[in-house]
Image (cartoon, rainbow, N blue to C red):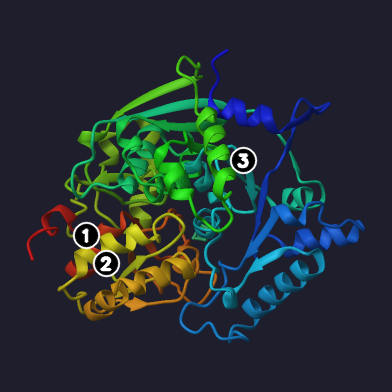
Amino acid sequence: MPATLFQKVWDAHKVRRLPNGQTQLFVGLHLVHEVTSPQAFDMLRARGSGVAFPDRTIATVDHIVPTRDQRRPFLDVMAEDMLSALEKNCRQAGVRLFDIASGSQGIVHVIGPELGLTQPGMTIACGDSHTSTHGAFGAIAFGIGTSQVRDVLASQCLALDPLKVRRIVVSGRLAPGVYAKDVILEIIRRLGVNGGVGYAYEYAGEAIDRMSMDERMTICNMSIEGGARAGYVNPDDTTIDYLRGRRFAPQGDDFDRAAEWWRRLASDSGASYDDEVRIDGDAIRPVVTWGINPGQSVYVDESLPRPADLPAAERDAVGEALAFMGFEAGAPIAGTKIDVAFVGSCTNARLSDLREAARIVRGRTVAPHVTALVVPGSQGVSAAAEREGLHEVFAAAGFEWRGAGCSMCLAMNQDRLEGRQVCASSSNRNFKGRQGSPVGRTLLMSPAMVAAAAVAGEVVDVRSLSNDH
Ligand code: SF4
């Protein structure tokens, strides 16, 4: 029977069907960070258990690390305590930790792929919502809660309900100035922030096939924002070329054997899906969110919705979002003044993202009223960008070049909005309070659009800036 990649990977990792109808699934790779693991390790100790598969468990520090001064001990006592706890837990359990001194530290969803830990056909779990990122490689990757982190540490297994699979076919070629971020924001806008509940999303079509791994990661990263439990792209030459030679990928003949298997995992033609959605990639334009969830967005050349024009069921939510944002119904999104520009996060802080943002800011200057920062997704990204001189391009334009971490995506460190500031952000969530200030406002967009907003001082169509200097 023709099968989807999801079915093949699920079946390959199925241990047994549990009495409650769930599946006990073996987890190939467990990624751990400092925020959701301390309690899980404590629970494990309280039960007298150890880590079942330390060699399948990898840790890093990302959420709480300062990005200005990363010398130890951190000035932030709570951050220092959290990292110290992670270090102790990893030492005791024999788990490899990529800490600040390792040279390979970074956001968990950035370092997994760049180190070659993330591979096609794997099941991957991490105590973080955006674990779906790893699906870009044809892995099935789940964000899990703290008690599930404990379960995976203790047993390397998860109890899960099977998912339906929705195939999302993005046809055509993206226009210049349109990026993977625009594609996923468009998908979420069309299907809704809860449209994917109960599903894994399989992304396919010419526009996806043409994307780099960085771009596919951006797409899969935000699957969770559309309600999907996981998102994936079938492995192909792009996947295999990316992984060849990576530190933890198979080497030599082993790699060729693995690559042969990876290719066979791709969904079979004729596989059946629970749903299929088609999107015309040629027609997508740069997207900007205007509200308080990632589905509340418009194209940059569109205007904000008017509640009175909408179906009754949508009016309250749109009205609440407009009121929180302080935006006028029907006003154009272009021209919205920003205070902060943030290029960072596991969605868009990889080398290609930084290159695109740098291409926009090169020879330009950040508007005087804007605070602009670039936070690379990992030390690896940072080093590669510095080898290309991107840090100098950003610095010359007036951006701050910071150390790797989650930073203002979640504001668990000192990088936070103040008061009602408006932030043009390449991150993934625009919920109330997400960037540190309970009344701060987040506009999600591509890194290139963030760069354009930084220099213009307001939301602007990056397509009008790209080639005129
Ligand atoms: S960058 Fe943001 S979304 Fe990604 S892992 Fe960090 S806090 Fe979570």
Q: Quadrant of residue 354?
A: bottom left
- Residue 151 seen: yes
Tell me if 414 is positioned left or right of 389 in this view: right
Say few, some or many: other residues with alpha carbon within 10 Å of mark 3 (under 14 / 14 to 19 / 20 or more).
many
Sequence-wise first label, 2 or 3: 3
Disc 3 element:
loop
Question: Residue 139: image x %, image y %?
Answer: 56, 40
**In the foreground, 456 or 306:** 456
In this figure, which residue is indicated by the disc labeled 1? 459
Three-letter amino acid code at the position of disc 3:
Met
Question: Residue at left 80%, top 64%?
Answer: 93
- Residue 375 seen: no
Sequence-wise first label, 1 or 2: 2
Three-letter amino acid code at the position of disc 1:
Val
Asked whether the residues under the numbered discs 1 and 2 touch, taking CB atoms below 8 Å apart as contact, a structural biologist would say yes
Three-letter amino acid code at the position of disc 2:
Ile
Q: Relative to 322, does residue 140 appear above or below in the rendering?
A: above
* Residue 122: assigned label: 3
**In the foreground, 38 or 155:** 155
Quadrant of the image containing the N terminus? top right
Question: Residue at left 71%, top 70%?
Answer: 86
In this figure, which residue is indicated by the disc labeled 2? 338
Question: Residue 307: image x %, image y %?
Answer: 30, 40
Question: Residue at left 7%, top 61%?
Answer: 468
Disc 2 element:
loop
